[in-house]
Image: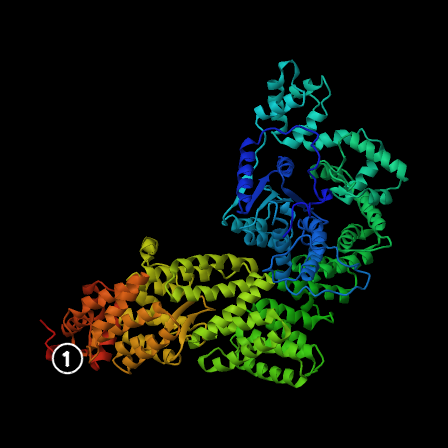
C-alpha cells in the first residue's frame, strides 16, 4: 500500500507552484463546477472536465488557480502539455509519466495485484510514452513493445497507483495539438478509471484552425460517458474587467467603470490581451485607452510588437532564437544557439523578461517560457523566413552534441533540420526524420511514424530511398487505419515505372484497398503492370505475395476463375518455400476466393490455418483478419460455438492493437448475437457504435450498412410506420440499393411498386456468394408476400443451394436466418417440394444458433404454410402458440402481424389449387373475357400486377390459355 509520506510529486513537474503575477477574477460559475467535480472525484468517481475557448481566454489560468488550490488542500497534481510542432507521440502524458516513473521503479508506487503487466513491463511502456528510453545511438537492447494495449494499460496502472492514497489531479494542456496516439491514450484513460480518485482537467482551443475534426469526433464519444463534461470559457464582461482593474490598482479616481468599458471594447474581453495591455499602461496613459483614436494597441500582436521595438537588436535576436526553440526554453540550449557569449545572452534574457516577453517557468527546473503561446507566435511571425531558417539551423547544430540522444532530442533535431534543409542540410533532415519515424514506429505511434516517414520521403533526393520511406509510411498508415493515406503513397511508388520498389508499392496499394472492400480495378492494373515488368522468379517471396494479392483483387472484378487459380498456385508455392510469414499472407489473400456454399469448407480451413499460425507467432493482426472470416462462416453454417470463438479473437485483437478496424468486426458479431436473441435496444446501440467506428478507418461505406440495420430493427419491432410518410413509391431504383427498397415497399404493403421492383430485380443474376445471400432472402419475402409464383419458381434453385445454412447480408451487416425457412415458404407457395421438412431443418438451425428471433419467424412461416394447405396432421395451434409466446416476449411486431394475418386468412373460404382471393377475382374477370389492361382498371392495380396474377393462375391451375381458365372457373363454381 502506498503511503502519503512515501511519495509526492516532484515540484519540477508542476507549473502551478508559484503565484501568478496578475490577479485572478471572475469565473465563479466555472470554479464552482470544478469544485463540484473535485468533490465527486474524492469520493471515487473519476471526473473529466474539458475547458475550451479561444486562445488567450484564460483556460490555462483557470487550471493553474484550481491546481494551486487543490494542491494546498492535499491533492497530488501532475501536469503535462502539448506543443504544436515539437512534441513526442504521447504528449501530454510524457511529463506526468516522467514524474511517476521513479516511484514505480523503486516500488514506492505499488501496482494493483490485478494488473496483467509486471513492474518491468510497465517501466518499459512508460519509457515509450516519455521518450526517455535508452540512448538511440547507444546500441542498447531493443524492447519489443508488442501492441499498444500494453502502453495504455501501463499508463492507467501508474495513474491508479498514484491515486491510491491521495486524490490525483491530472492537468493536460492544449490537447488540440495532441497526436492520434495521444488522443487514443486519453480516451483509454478516461474509459478505464471510472472508480479512481482522479480529476482530469484538459484545455483545448475551440476555434479554427486548431479545432480539428478528429479531435471533435474523439471528444464527442467521450462526452457520452458518465462524469465527462465540458466548460467553454467566454471573454470577460465589463464588470469582471473593472474588478481586475481594482485588484491591479488601476481604477483610481473612480474611473474604473469607464476604463473597463473601453478596455472591453478594445480587447473583446480576452483576458490575455487585457493583462498585456494593462501591463503596458503606465500611470496616466489610460487616456490612450479611453480614446478610440489613441495610440493604444489594437490586438495582442500590436502589444507584443510594441515591446519588441524597445529591445536592442542583439537582445531581439536572442529572443527570436528562444521562439524558434519553443514555448518552453532550455537556457543551456539557448546559450549554445545564440551568437553571443553567455553573459551577453543572459543580459538579453533579462531584457526580454523586463518587458514581459519571457519569464522563468514556475518550479525548480530553471527553464524559461513565453507568457503565452500567442506571444511566442507573434515573435515568430515577425522573423523573416530567411532569418528564421538560419535560426532553425543554429538550434539544430546546438542540439548536435555528444552524449545521450533520446527520442525527444531526435524529434527536435528532425524538426529543426527539416525547417533548415534548404540551406544544404537535406541529408541531416532526412536522417533525423527517418530516425524519429523509427522511434515512433517502435513506440507503436503509427500515425506519427507515418507522417515522419512521408516527410522524409518528400525531402529525400534519392528516388530509391524516398520510395522506401513512402512504403514505410504506407505500412504505418495501414496499421493506423488510415487506408486512403496508405493508398495514395503506395500508388505513387507503384505507378513509377523507374522505381525498384514498384512491385512492393502495388502490393501495398492492394493491401490498403481490400480492407475496405473497394473496387480493385486500379489494384489489378498496378499489380499486373508491375509483375510483367519484374523478372520471372516464381519462388521469390515478393513475387508470390504479389500474385496472391492480384488474385484477391481479381475477386472484386468478378474474375473468379483466375483468382482461384492464383490462390491455389501461390499457396502451393508458399508451402514449398516453407515460409510461414508468406503462407499466412497468401492464405489470407485467398479468403476472398470462392465464397459460394460449396467453397466454405476450404475457406474455413484456410482461416483456421491462419489463426493457428498467427497464434504461434503472437501475430494478432493476421489473427484478427482470420477471425472475421471464421465469424462470418460460423454464422452461415450454424456453428454458434465457432462464432463465439471468432468473436473472442476479434475482441482480443481489437483490444491489443487499439485499432477500430477490428473493433468494427467484433461489433458486427455483437450486433448479430443481439439481433437474433431479440436484444434490440442493445443492437441499436451497437449499430450506432459501428457507424462511428467505420468512419474512423474509411469514410465510405458505413452509413449504408447502418441504414439497413436500422431497417431490420424497425421491421422486427414494428417501427417502420414512422417512415411511411417519407416513402412515395416513386423512388429511383437506380439511385438506391434496390433490394433494400424492395424490402421497404414489401413491409409497408405497397404491393404495386413492390411488384415493379421485384420484377426489375429478378432478371439479374442471383446472389451466389455467401455475403450476397441475404438478397435472396429479401427477394423471397417479396415473392411470398405478393404470391408471385413465377418469381418464386425462379428463385427456388438459388435458395436451394444454401440449404442447411443461414443467409446473410454483407459481412454480418444483417442476418436473415435459415435458407430452409425461405425454401419452405417458396415450396408452400408453389405447392411442391417438402415444406414440412424445410421448416423442421430451419427450426433445428435456429435452435442450434440460440436464435429465438429466427425461430419465431420460422414458426410463423410454418403456420402460414398449414393455413394455406391444411394441417395435414400437424398441431398448427401449438405452432402458433409457441410463435406468439416468443414474439410477445421479445416484441416481434412483424411476427405477430403475420400470425394475425394468417389467422384472419384461415377463416376465409379455401379455394382450389391454392388460389388466393385476388387470383379468384382475376380468374372471374378472365372468364368474362377481360384483357389484362381491363382487369387492371377494374381492380385498380397496375397492368404488370394483373399480368403476374394471370401467370400465377396458369401455373397453379395448369390452364394453358384464357379459354381453359374460364372453363376452370365454371367447373369449380367460382363464378357467381
Snapshot colouring:
rainbow
Residue 105: which quarter of the image?
Answer: bottom right
In this orientation, which residue lies closer to the viewer: 595 or 245? Answer: 245
- Residue that label 1 marks: 968
User: Which of the image's four quarters has the C terminus?
Assistant: bottom left
Does residue 60 appear left or right of residue 410 in this picture?
left
Quadrant in the picture for residue 973: bottom left
Residue 87 image offset from top left, x and y in percent: 71, 50
The residue under the point 25% across, 72% down is 879
Taking depth in this image into account, of 755 and 196 the one nearest to the observer is 196
Mark 1 crowdedness (10 Å alpha carbons): few <14, some 14-19, many ≥20: some
Q: Tell me residue 580's x, y (percent).
A: 65, 79
Query: Which percent across, then down, holds residue 276?
Result: 70, 29
Residue, x 73% and y 60% (percent of image)? Answer: 439
Q: Is residue 822 left or right of residue 202?
A: left
The image shows residue 34 at horizontal and vertical percentages of 56, 38
Q: As drawn, which residue projects farthest toward the top?
A: 253
Q: Residue at the spot x=31%, y=76% of the render?
A: 792
Q: How many marks?
A: 1
Instruction: Name which quarter of the figure residue 949 lies in.
Output: bottom left
Q: Secondary structure at mark 1?
A: helix
Q: Is 738 displayed left or right of 153 in the figure?
A: left
Is any part of residue 880 visible from this angle? yes
Answer yes or no: is residue 551 visible. Answer: no
Amino acid at each position: 500500500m502506498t503511503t502519503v509520506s512515501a511519495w509526492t510529486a516532484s515540484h519540477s513537474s508542476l507549473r502551478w507552484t508559484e503565484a501568478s503575477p496578475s490577479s485572478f477574477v471572475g469565473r465563479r460559475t466555472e470554479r464552482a463546477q470544478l469544485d463540484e467535480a473535485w468533490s465527486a472525484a474524492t469520493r471515487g468517481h473519476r471526473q473529466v472536465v474539458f475547458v475550451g475557448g479561444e486562445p488567450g481566454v484564460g483556460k490555462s489560468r483557470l487550471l493553474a488557480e484550481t491546481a494551486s488550490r487543490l494542491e494546498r488542500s492535499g491533492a497530488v497534481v501532475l501536469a503535462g502539455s502539448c506543443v504544436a510542432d515539437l512534441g513526442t507521440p504521447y504528449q501530454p502524458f510524457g511529463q506526468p509519466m516522467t514524474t511517476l516513473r521513479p516511484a514505480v521503479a523503486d516500488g514506492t508506487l505499488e501496482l494493483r495485484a490485478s494488473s496483467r503487466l509486471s513492474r518491468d513491463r510497465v517501466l518499459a511502456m512508460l519509457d515509450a510514452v516519455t521518450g526517455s528510453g535508452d540512448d538511440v545511438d547507444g546500441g542498447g537492447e531493443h524492447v519489443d513493445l508488442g501492441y499498444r494495449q500494453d502502453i495504455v494499460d501501463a499508463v492507467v496502472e501508474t495513474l491508479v497507483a498514484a491515486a491510491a492514497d491521495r486524490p490525483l489531479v491530472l492537468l493536460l494542456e492544449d490537447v488540440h495539438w495532441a497526436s492520434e496516439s495521444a488522443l487514443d491514450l486519453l480516451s483509454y484513460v478516461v474509459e478505464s478509471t471510472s472508480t479512481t480518485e482522479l480529476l482530469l482537467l484538459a484545455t483545448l482551443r475551440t476555434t479554427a484552425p486548431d479545432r480539428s475534426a478528429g479531435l471533435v469526433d474523439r471528444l464527442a464519444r467521450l462526452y457520452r460517458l458518465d462524469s465527462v463534461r465540458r466548460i467553454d470559457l467566454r471573454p470577460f464582461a465589463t464588470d469582471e474587467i473593472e474588478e481586475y482593474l481594482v485588484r491591479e490598482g488601476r481604477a483610481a479616481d473612480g474611473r474604473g467603470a469607464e476604463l473597463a468599458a473601453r478596455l472591453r471594447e478594445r480587447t473583446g474581453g480576452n483576458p490575455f490581451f487585457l493583462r498585456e495591455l494593462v501591463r503596458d499602461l503606465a500611470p496616466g496613459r489610460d487616456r490612450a485607452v479611453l480614446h478610440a483614436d489613441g495610440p493604444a494597441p489594437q490586438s495582442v500582436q500590436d502589444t507584443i510588437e510594441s515591446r519588441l521595438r524597445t529591445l536592442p537588436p542583439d537582445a531581439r535576436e536572442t529572443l527570436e532564437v528562444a521562439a524558434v526553440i519553443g514555448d518552453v526554453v532550455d537556457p543551456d540550449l539557448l546559450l549554445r544557439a545564440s551568437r553571443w557569449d553567455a553573459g551577453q545572452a543572459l543580459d538579453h534574457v533579462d531584457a526580454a523578461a523586463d518587458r514581459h516577453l519571457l519569464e522563468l517557468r514556475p518550479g525548480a527546473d530553471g527553464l524559461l517560457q513565453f507568457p503565452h503561446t500567442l506571444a511566442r507566435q507573434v515573435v515568430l511571425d515577425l522573423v523573416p523566413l530567411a532569418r528564421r531558417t538560419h535560426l532553425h539551423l543554429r538550434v539544430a547544430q546546438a542540439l548536435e552534441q555528444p552524449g545521450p540522444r533520446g527520442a525527444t532530442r531526435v524529434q527536435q533535431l528532425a524538426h529543426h533540420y527539416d525547417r533548415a534543409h534548404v540551406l544544404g542540410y537535406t541529408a541531416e533532415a532526412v536522417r533525423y526524420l527517418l530516425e524519429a519515424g523509427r522511434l515512433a514506429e517502435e513506440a507503436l505511434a503509427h500515425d506519427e511514424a507515418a507522417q515522419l516517414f512521408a516527410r522524409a520521403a518528400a525531402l529525400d533526393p534519392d528516388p530509391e530511398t524516398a520510395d522506401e520511406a513512402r512504403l514505410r509510411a504506407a505500412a504505418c498508415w495501414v496499421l493506423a487505419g488510415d487506408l486512403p493515406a496508405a493508398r495514395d503513397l503506395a500508388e505513387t511508388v507503384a505507378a513509377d515505372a523507374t522505381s525498384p520498389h514498384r512491385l512492393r508499392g502495388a502490393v501495398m496499394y492492394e493491401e490498403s484497398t481490400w480492407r475496405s472492400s473497394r473496387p480493385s480495378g486500379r489494384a489489378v492494373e498496378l499489380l499486373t503492370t508491375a509483375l510483367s515488368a519484374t523478372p520471372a522468379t516464381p519462388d521469390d517471396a515478393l513475387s508470390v505475395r504479389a500474385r496472391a494479392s492480384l488474385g484477391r483483387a481479381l475477386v472484386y472484378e468478378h474474375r473468379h476463375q483466375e483468382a482461384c487459380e492464383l490462390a491455389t498456385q501461390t499457396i502451393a508455392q508458399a508451402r514449398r518455400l516453407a515460409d510461414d510469414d508468406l503462407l499466412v499472407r497468401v492464405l489470407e489473400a485467398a479468403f476472398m476466393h470462392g465464397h459460394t456454399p460449396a467453397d466454405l469448407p476450404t475457406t474455413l480451413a484456410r482461416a483456421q490455418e491462419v489463426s493457428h499460425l498467427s497464434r504461434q507467432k503472437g501475430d494478432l493482426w493476421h489473427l484478427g483478419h482470420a477471425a472475421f472470416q471464421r465469424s462470418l462462416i460460423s454464422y452461415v453454417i450454424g456453428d454458434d460455438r465457432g462464432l463465439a470463438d471468432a468473436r473472442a479473437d476479434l475482441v482480443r485483437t481489437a483490444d491489443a492493437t487499439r485499432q477500430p478496424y477490428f473493433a468494427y468486426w467484433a461489433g458486427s458479431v455483437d450486433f448479430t448475437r443481439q439481433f437474433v436473441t431479440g436484444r434490440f435496444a442493445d443492437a441499436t446501440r451497437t449499430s450506432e457504435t459501428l457507424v462511428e467506428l467505420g468512419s474512423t478507418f474509411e469514410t465510405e461505406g458505413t452509413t449504408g450498412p447502418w441504414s439497413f440495420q436500422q431497417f431490420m430493427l424497425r421491421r422486427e419491432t414494428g417501427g417502420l410506420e414512422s417512415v411511411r410518410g417519407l416513402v412515395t413509391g416513386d423512388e429511383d431504383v437506380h439511385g438506391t440499393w434496390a433490394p433494400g427498397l424492395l424490402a421497404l415497399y414489401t413491409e409497408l404493403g405497397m404491393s404495386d411498386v413492390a411488384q415493379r421492383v421485384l420484377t426489375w430485380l429478378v432478371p439479374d443474376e442471383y446472389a451466389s456468394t455467401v455475403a450476397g445471400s441475404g438478397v435472396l432472402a429479401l427477394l423471397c419475402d417479396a415473392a411470398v408476400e405478393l404470391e408471385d409464383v413465377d418469381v418464386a419458381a425462379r428463385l427456388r434453385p438459388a435458395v436451394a443451394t444454401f440449404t442447411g445454412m443461414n443467409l446473410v447480408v454483407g459481412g454480418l451487416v444483417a442476418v436473415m436466418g435459415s435458407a430452409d425457412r425461405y425454401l419452405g415458404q417458396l415450396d408452400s407457395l408453389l405447392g411442391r417440394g417438402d415444406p414440412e421438412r424445410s421448416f423442421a431443418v430451419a427450426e433445428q438451425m435456429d435452435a442450434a444458433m440460440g436464435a429465438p428471433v429466427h425461430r419465431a419467424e420460422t414458426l410463423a412461416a410454418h403456420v402460414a404454410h398449414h393455413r394455406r394447405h391444411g394441417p395435414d396432421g400437424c398441431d398448427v395451434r401449438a405452432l402458433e402458440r409457441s410463435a406468439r409466446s416468443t414474439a410477445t416476449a421479445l416484441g416481434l411486431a412483424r411476427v405477430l402481424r403475420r400470425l394475425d394475418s394468417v389467422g384472419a386468412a384461415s377463416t376465409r373460404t379455401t379455394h382450389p389449387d391454392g388460389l388466393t382471393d385476388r387470383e379468384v377475382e382475376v380468374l372471374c374477370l378472365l372468364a368474362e373475357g377481360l384483357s389484362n389492361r381491363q382487369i387492371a382498371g377494374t381492380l385498380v392495380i397496375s397492368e404488370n400486377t394483373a399480368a403476374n396474377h394471370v401467370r400465377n393462375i396458369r401455373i397453379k391451375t395448369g390452364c394453358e390459355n384464357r379459354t381453359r381458365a374460364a372453363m376452370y372457373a365454371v367447373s369449380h363454381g367460382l363464378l357467381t
